Amino acid sequence: MTPHAAVAGDEPLSYPVRAARTVFSGRVWEVRSEDVDLGAAGVVTREYIAHPGAVAIAALDEADRVLLVRQYRHPARHLMWELPAGLRDIPGEPPQVTAERELWEETHHRAGHYELLLDTFLSPGSSSERLLVFLARDVRLADGDRHEGEAEEATMQTAWVPLDELTRGVLEGRFHNPSLTLGVLALAARRGGA
């Protein structure tokens, strides 16, 4: 048994890449194959999804309710409740600006205050996707014209749901979207003093 050790956190590290190939190039991401030199462990080939990253917004109102959107997710074959979210696909755009834009586009809301709630990789063994979840407060309906969504976003529903109800739903396995489950658990832990 390994004795208990202090763990400070993850550490950025990049081993040398000896060869790299793009296996597939799509609209949003690529699949890459890279030969990685692990030193004494040898050279290994790793395939992964090269993803631009994403933001999600945990918009919380004065009544401790979270603003959700409902969207069809074809790979999972589910209609899912999610936090408003979007890709970090505009080069140089700061993540908070992306969050502000996505909250408006998906829900027609603005927030007076943003802070980073969570920073995580969603599937580090198979994707470079990094998700930043922002807590948004002082949330209100935006003025002016609404953003016209396309494809799955054209029929997106919104709902304000109590945080306690969402937390129970996540722990009971009724919600499956990772940005929602991670964001809700982070909100609940923060409220509980964690």
Image (cartoon, helix red, strand yellow):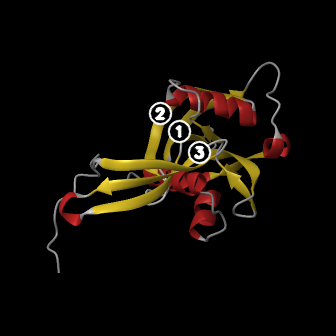
Q: Residue furthest right?
A: 155
- Residue 62 visible in the current orientation: no
Is residue 147 rendered to the left or right of residue 1?
A: right
Q: Secondary structure at mark 2?
A: strand
Residue 99 in the image: state x and y as whole percent: 58, 32
Is residue 62 rendered to the left or right of residue 69?
A: left
Label 1 amino acid? Leu
Q: Which residue is mark 1?
A: 135
* Image quarter (top left, top right, bottom left or bottom right) of the N terminus: bottom left
Do labels 1 and 2 touch, CB within 8 Å? yes
Instruction: Pick whichever of labels 1 and 3 is earlier in the sequence.
Output: 3
- Residue 63 visible in the current orientation: yes
Label 2 amino acid? Glu
Circle 2 packing at 10 Å, graded few (<14), some (14-19), many (20+), is few
Q: Which residue is mark 3?
A: 29
Q: Secondary structure at mark 1?
A: strand
Q: Residue at x 47, y 33 (%)?
A: 115
- State the CA–CA distance, disc 1 to disc 3: 26 Å
Do labels 1 and 3 touch, CB within 8 Å? no
Q: Relative to residue 102, is residue 69 depicted above or below?
A: below
Is residue 80 rendered to the left or right of residue 19?
A: right
Q: Residue at x 27, y 52 (%)?
A: 9
Q: Secondary structure at mark 3?
A: loop
Instruction: Pick whichever of labels 2 and 3 is earlier in the sequence.
Output: 3
Q: Nearer the viewer, residue 168 or 180?
A: 180
Check residue 83 in the rendering and tell me which mark sits there, or answer none. none
Instruction: Pick whichever of labels 1 and 2 is earlier in the sequence.
Output: 2
Residue 107 in the image: state x and y as whole percent: 74, 36
Q: Which residue is mark 2?
A: 115
- Tell us which disc is closer to us: 1 or 3: 3
Residue 47 in the image: state x and y as whole percent: 47, 58
